[in-house]
Amino acid sequence: MPQLPLRQLLEEMAHQPKLVSFPTDTVPALAARPEHAELIYAAKRRPPEKPLILMGASLIDLLPYVAGSPHEQAIWQAVVRQHWPGQLTLVLPASAIAPKTLNPQTSTPQISKAQISKAQTSHGQPAGTQLNTLGIRVPNHPVALELLSHTGPLATTSANISGQPPLTSWADITQTFPDILTPPVDTFEQADEISGQPSTVIKWTGDDWQVLRQGKVKL
C-alpha cells in the first residue's frame, strides 16, 4: 500500500478512483469519493444493505445532504455544537442530493399514513417515497480534517473485512488492503488522538434520538 504525502495523495484521488485509509479520532477509516463507494463494498466484501457514513471537515460541508424542518435542524445543530468534531455519528433523513451509493440496497419499510404525512410536512418528500437516512460525522483528528477539507465529504467506514473487528494499525491495514493509499505511517501512531473505539451512532426518529451503537460519547 503506497504511503504518500497529503498533496500527492490528493492528486492520486483527483485523477482516478482510489481507496484511501487515514486515521481518525476513533478507528482508521477506509474511504473513497462518494461516486466510487462501490470500491469500499468490494474491498471489504460488505453486504449492500449495510450503509456507509459520509464524513466531512465541517457541518457546513455535510448539511446539504440531510433534510429536516427548521426546528429539527436546530436540535441537530445543538448536538453538533456539543460533540463535533468528535466521536459521534448522526443518522438523519437524507436530502434529495445525498449520494445513493452510500446506501445502495435500502430495504423499503412499511410506511404508515402518519409517517408519510410527517415526511411531507418536515422533509418535503412526496407521499409514498422511502424515508432514506444518511449517517454523517466530523472527526476530531488533524490528518482526517486536513484531508477532508481538500476532498470534500467522503464515503467512509472502518478499515476491516466486513464482520471482522476494525483494524487499528497501519501494518494490519497494509496487509489486508495492499492496494489502497494512505498518508505517512506515523500519522496512524498518534495514540493520544485515537480512541480505538468506533463512534457512538444515534438516529433521529422524528422527535428524539435512538442510540444505535454506544461508543465513547454519551448523550
Image (tube, rainbow, N blue to C red):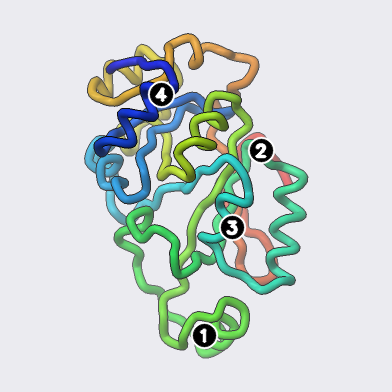
Decide: is 188 above or below 165.
above
- Identify the residue under disc 1: 116
Q: Which amino acid lies under the numbered mark 3 shown in the image of this protein?
A: Leu
- Disc assigned to residue 42: none
Q: Nearer the viewer, mark 3 or mark 1?
A: 3
**In what element is the residue under mark 2?**
loop
Q: Earlier in the sequence, mark 3 or mark 4?
A: 3
Cα distance between the residues tagged 4 and 1: 40 Å
| Residue name at image x 50 percent, y 28 percent | 27
Residue 79, placed above or below residue 163: below
Label 1 residue SS: helix
N-term mark: 1 or 2: 2
Structural crowding at the residue carrying mark 1, measured as other residues with C-alpha within 10 Å and reported as few (<14), some (14–19) or many (≥20): some
C-alpha span from label 1 to label 2: 33 Å
Asked whether the residues under the numbered discs 2 and 4 touch, taking CB atoms below 8 Å apart as contact, a structural biologist would say no
Q: Which residue is mark 3?
A: 63
- Residue where numbered disc 2 is placed: 85
**Under tag 4, what secondary structure?**
loop
